[in-house]
Image (tube, coloured by chain):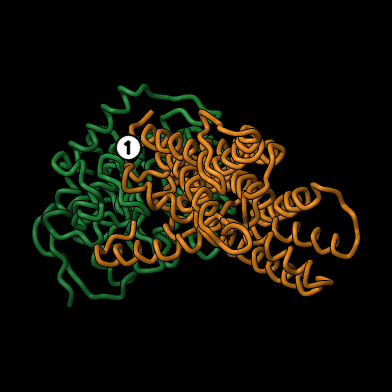
Chain colours: A orange, B green
C-alpha cells in the first residue's frame, strides 16, 4: 500500500470515530454513557457513517475515472446523465405516492436504480462498437438534459405543496435517517462499480495520450466504454438511489489527490475512493452539528456551500500558476 | 519482415494503395497537404480498417491480429501528441510498456525486470536521462518530441510509424531525432514516417513514397521518387536539387 493510501486510511479511521461521537447528543463511542446511547450509535450513526464511506468512495473513484476517460480535469460523474435519470425515477415515485398510489417503503430507491439502469442501457445502445468519446459524451449530456426536463415536468405535476417540499428535500441529498438496509443496497453496488474502474485503470492510463495512441497501445475502446458505463452507472446510480443528489465529491476529490500521485489515472482511483469517503464522512458530521432551525443542514447543500468556494479558490490558484493538470 | 498494404481503399482518404515496406529501412512518405499521408500511416498501424484491401503484418492480416499483439509489433507516434495529465518523462515512457504488461483477461508478455530494462534503453536512446523526473509541462517542444518517441521505443516495436515526427523541431533537435530513428532502423526496426521537408526525406530516407490525391505517384530511392519532374507535377513548384547525394538542398524557382 502506498504512503498516500495509508495516510488517507488513517484519516478515514479518525474521521469515522469522530463522526460516531458528533451529533445532537455527543457520545463517546468507546464508553456510551446513557441508556439508548448504544442504540443511537449502532442503529443511527454507524449505518450513516458506513453509507458516507460507501457513497464517498463510489463518487470519488467515479470522478477520477470520468476525468481520465474524458481527459479533462473539469469532468464530473454527472456528465453521463446517470444522476438525473436516477433522480427522475425517485421523483416519479414520490409524485405517484403524493397522488395516493402506494408503492411501498423502498419504491423510491428501486425506481431510482431503475432510472440509472435505463440511462445505462441507453448509453450502451448509443455507444455502439466504435467507442468514440466525444459523441458519446454529448449523448450523455442529452440524456441528462432530457431527464432533467422530465423531472421538472414531474415536479410541476406534484399535487400539493407538501409533496413538492418532500421532492425538493429528497433532491437535495442527505444521509439522515438512513438504516443498515440502505448500506446493504449501496455498498455492493459501489464495490462492483469501483471494481469496474480498477479493471479500466490501465486503459485509462493509455488514454492520457489520446484515443488514437490508446488504440495503438492495444486498448479496446468498446470494452473501456462499457466498463465506464457500468462503473459510473452503479456508483452514481446507487448513491442517488439511497442519498439523493450529492455533488462536488466526484469533481473535487480527484483534484485534491492528483498532486500527491504520479498523475497517472490508475494511481488515482483507489486514493480518490478513500479521499471521497473521508470527505463525505467529515462533511456529513459537520452537517449534523451545524445548528440550523428545523433540523440539520442537508448534505448536498453543505457540500456545495463548501465545495463551490473551494473550487473557485483552486481555479484561482491554477490560473496563477498556469497549471491545469 | 514486411508490412504490406494490398489495394488499400478508404473512401476520401487513400485509394488503391499497394506498398511493401521492409524492416531495417527508413521510408519517408511525402506529399502535399490532404494527399492522404496521415490516413495511410493510421491504416498501416491497423487503427483504421480499410473498406477494401488489407494490411499484412508478416503473413497475417492485420485486421485479424489481436489488438495487444498488434500493439507489441507496431508503434504509432501521432502528429502533435499531447498528454492530458502532467506526468513525468519516466511515467510517459513507461506507458509504452502497456501492451507487454498483464491486463484483465491478458497475461504479461514481459517480466517487470524486462520492462524496466527496455524503458531504461528508450530513455537513454532519446538522451532523456537528465530529464526523467521532469513533468512534461516543463519540457521544450524538442524535448517533448523526444520523450514521445521514447514512449514508442519503450514498446520495443518491430515497426515504427510516425506522423510528422520532425514537425516543429528546430534543426538540432530534428537531426538528433533522425539519428535516433536511424539507430532503430540499423537495429532492424522498420521506420515509416510522414515528412514535409523534402530535403530531410531526400538526405535521410532509404526510400520515398510520394502520395498525391490519395494515390501513390512515385515510390523508390529518394533520387528517383523526389526527382525534379515529380516535384513539379505533384507540388506544382519548379525546383531543383543542389549538392551531392546525401547532402542535397532544394532550391525553389
The answer to whether any part of residue B7 appears in the image is no
Residue B77's x, y, as percent?
35, 49
* Residue identifier under label 1: B94
Who's the residue at 69% across and 50% down the image?
Answer: A241
Say above or below: A225 vs B119.
below
Who's the residue at 41% across and 42% down the image?
Answer: A268
Q: Secondary structure at mark 1?
A: helix
Which quadrant of the figure has residue A151?
A: bottom right
Viewport quadrant of the N terminus of chain A: top left
Horizontal placement of A234 versus B222: left or right?
right
Which quadrant of the figure has residue A73?
A: bottom left
Residue A111's x, y, as percent?
78, 52
Residue A301's x, y, as percent?
55, 62
Say above or below: A49 vs A160.
above
Say above or below: A31 vs B166.
above
The answer to whether any part of residue A77 appears in the image is yes
Report the number of discs: 1
Horizontal placement of A23 versus A74: left or right?
right
Which is more toward the observer, A179 or A250?
A179
Residue B222's x, y, as percent?
24, 54
Crowd band around label 1 with a 10 angstrom C-alpha radius: few (<14), some (14–19), many (20+) = many
Amino acid at each position: 500500500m502506498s504512503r498516500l493510501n495509508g495516510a488517507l486510511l488513517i484519516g478515514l479511521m479518525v474521521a469515522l470515530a469522530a463522526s460516531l461521537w458528533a451529533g445532537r447528543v455527543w457520545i463517546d463511542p468507546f464508553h456510551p454513557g446513557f441508556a439508548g446511547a448504544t442504540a443511537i450509535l449502532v442503529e443511527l450513526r454507524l449505518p450513516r457513517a458506513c453509507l458516507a464511506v460507501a457513497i464517498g468512495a463510489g463518487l470519488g473513484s467515479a470522478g477520477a475515472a470520468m476525468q481520465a476517460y474524458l481527459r479533462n480535469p473539469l469532468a464530473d460523474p454527472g456528465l453521463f446523465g446517470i444522476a438525473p435519470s436516477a433522480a427522475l425515477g425517485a421523483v416519479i415515485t414520490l409524485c405517484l405516492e403524493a397522488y395516493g398510489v402506494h408503492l411501498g417503503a423502498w419504491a423510491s430507491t428501486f425506481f431510482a436504480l431503475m432510472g440509472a439502469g435505463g440511462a445505462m442501457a441507453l448509453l450502451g445502445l448509443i455507444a455502439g462498437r466504435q467507442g468514440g468519446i466525444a459523441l458519446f459524451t454529448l449523448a450523455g449530456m442529452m440524456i441528462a438534459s432530457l431527464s432533467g426536463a422530465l423531472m421538472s415536468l414531474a415536479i410541476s405535476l406534484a399535487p400539493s405543496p407538501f409533496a413538492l417540499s418532500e421532492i425538493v428535500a429528497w433532491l437535495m441529498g442527505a444521509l439522515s435517517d438512513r438504516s443498515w438496509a440502505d448500506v446493504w443496497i449501496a455498498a455492493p453496488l459501489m464495490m462492483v462499480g469501483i471494481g469496474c474502474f480498477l479493471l479500466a485503470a490501465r486503459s485509462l492510463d493509455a488514454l492520457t495520450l489520446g484515443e488514437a495512441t490508446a488504440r495503438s497501445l492495444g486498448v479496446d475502446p468498446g470494452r473501456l466504454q462499457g466498463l465506464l458505463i457500468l462503473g459510473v452507472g452503479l456508483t452514481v446510480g446507487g448513491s442517488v438511489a439511497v442519498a439523493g443528489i450529492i455533488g462536488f465529491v466526484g469533481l473535487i476529490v480527484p483534484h485534491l489527490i492528483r498532486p500527491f500521485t504520479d498523475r497517472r489515472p490508475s494511481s488515482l482511483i483507489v486514493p480518490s475512493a478513500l479521499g471521497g469517503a473521508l470527505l463525505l464522512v467529515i462533511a456529513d458530521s459537520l452537517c449534523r452539528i451545524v445548528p440550523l432551525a428545523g433540523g440539520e443542514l442537508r448534505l448536498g447543500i453543505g457540500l456545495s456551500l463548501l465545495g463551490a468556494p473551494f473550487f473557485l479558490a483552486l481555479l484561482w490558484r491554477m490560473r496563477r500558476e498556469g497549471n491545469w493538470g | 519482415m514486411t508490412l504490406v498494404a494490398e489495394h488499400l481503399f478508404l473512401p476520401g482518404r487513400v485509394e488503391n494503395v499497394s506498398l511493401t515496406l521492409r524492416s531495417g529501412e527508413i521510408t519517408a512518405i511525402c506529399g502535399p497537404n490532404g494527399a492522404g499521408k496521415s490516413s495511410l500511416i493510421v491504416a498501416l498501424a491497423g487503427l483504421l480498417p480499410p473498406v477494401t484491401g488489407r494490411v499484412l503484418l508478416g503473413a497475417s492480416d492485420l485486421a485479424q491480429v489481436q489488438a495487444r499483439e498488434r500493439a507489441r509489433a507496431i508503434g504509432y507516434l501521432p502528429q502533435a501528441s499531447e498528454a492530458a495529465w502532467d506526468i513525468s518523462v519516466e511515467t510517459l515512457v513507461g506507458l509504452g510498456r502497456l501492451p507487454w504488461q498483464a491486463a484483465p483477461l491478458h497475461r504479461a508478455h514481459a517480466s517487470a525486470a524486462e520492462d524496466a530494462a527496455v524503458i531504461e534503453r528508450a530513455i537513454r536512446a532519446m538522451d532523456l536521462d537528465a530529464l526523467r523526473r521532469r513533468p512534461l509541462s516543463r519540457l521544450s517542444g524538442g524535448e517533448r518530441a523526444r520523450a514521445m518517441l521514447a514512449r514508442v521505443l519503450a514498446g520495443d516495436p518491430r515497426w515504427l510509424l510516425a506522423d510528422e515526427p520532425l514537425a516543429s523541431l528546430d534543426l538540432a533537435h530534428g537531426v538528433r531525432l533522425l539519428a535516433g530513428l536511424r539507430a532503430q532502423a540499423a537495429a532492424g526496426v522498420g521506420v515509416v514516417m510522414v515528412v514535409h521537408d523534402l530535403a530531410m526525406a531526400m538526405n535521410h530516407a532509404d526510400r520515398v513514397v510520394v502520395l498525391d490525391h490519395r494515390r501513390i505517384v512515385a515510390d523508390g530511392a529518394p533520387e528517383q521518387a523526389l526527382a525534379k519532374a515529380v516535384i513539379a507535377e505533384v507540388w506544382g513548384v519548379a525546383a531543383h536539387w543542389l549538392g551531392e547525394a546525401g547532402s542535397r538542398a532544394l532550391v525553389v524557382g
